[in-house]
Amino acid sequence: MTVSGTLYVVATPIGNLQDISPRALAILRDVDVIAAEDTRHSARLLQHFGITTATTACHDHNERDKSQRLIERMLAGESIALISDAGTPLISDPGFHLVRQAREAGVRVSPLPGPCALIAALSAAGVPSDRFAFEGFLPAKSKGRRDRIQALAAEPRTWMIYEAPHRLLECLQDLLDLLGPERQVVLAREVTKTFETIKGAPLAELVDWVRADSDQQRGECVLVVEGAPSVDDSDALPAEVERTLTILLDELPLKQAAALAAKLTGEKKNRLYQWALAKDAQVGDTD
Ligand code: SAM
């Protein structure tokens, strides 16, 4: 009886080639074939480390068909390493179908952990990291992006997104509009590379800073968004203000309700906005 091979899911550097682990290099040397998102892109990494293992392409457009053939090879005893262009496969990268099908076929799947942009960003952001959520890339179009941000506005955990440099400023502007000027956000840019920058600030300040310096709109970036504040006694609103805002929230979107309540009561709009967000989150918690 043939013992089936293993599918190794291998993380590769997100910028600094020295971040690859010795075990990852050994596996990349030893496997029968490396399934790479882009074989030409990965050739640079493999050449750098003198690895001559054969490669085959496994990307978003061919993954479903390719997986079947790769699984047949593993069932026949071969071992395969899956890599993406950078970081950990399957994290906003191809590999899900291959891993799922391999597991369903009874093939052993073994991870080789290593670089991952969101974890690297979170580890240096200095925001609560005991619980967090990863949202991948938000929709490219403004309407879809704003809808997702609105749905996340009351999320109490830290959440993270990947963003393309040419959309960074638009995305930050949408975050500012929907989360308010005081929400703390960390921009982690070019992590592990020469121009690594990790800047945390309230959204209003961060947007101005990025707008004023076009260098901050280049390269790869992760945004780490601190969760919505929870309401405690020190945040309590005067009873009349709370009543007004609660009534308006039943009829209007959160932003409009906060703006109108601010006009009616003289309270600061952002305070009302944050209070309403936190209340929304608490309602969500009890669902
Ligand atoms: N699989 C990768 C990982 O483990 O992080 C992510 C792949 S995804 C296609 C690429 C996105 O990851 C970029 O658009 C950027 O948002 C983020 N990213 C990758 N490398 C980065 C870096 N060095 N610094 C900051 N963000 C990075």
Image (tube, helix red, strand yellow):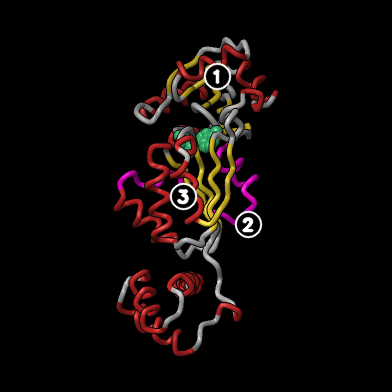
Residue drawn at point x = 51 percent, y = 15 percent? 43
Q: CA distance from mark 2 to mark 1?
A: 43 Å
Report the disc number at residue 128.
Answer: 2
Name the element at disc 1: loop
Q: Is mark 1 within 8 Å of ligand 1?
A: no
Q: Which badge, 2 or 1, comes first in the chain's sequence?
A: 1
Judge depth for marks 2 and 1 and give the one in front: 2
Q: Position of residue 140 (x, y in %)?
A: 34, 44
The residue closer to the viewer here, 143 or 75, is 143
Q: Position of residue 167 (x, y in %)?
A: 38, 41
Q: Does residue 22 show up magenta in the picture?
A: no
Disc 3: which residue: 208
The residue closer to the viewer here, 35 or 197, is 197
**Magenta residues, as a range?**
116-141
- Looking at the rendering, in which quadrant would you find the N terminus? top right
Judge depth for marks 1 and 3 and give the one in front: 3
Residue 283, placed above or below residue 30: below
Disc 1: which residue: 78
Q: Which badge, 3 or 2, comes first in the chain's sequence?
A: 2
Q: Position of residue 265 (x, y in %)?
A: 41, 84
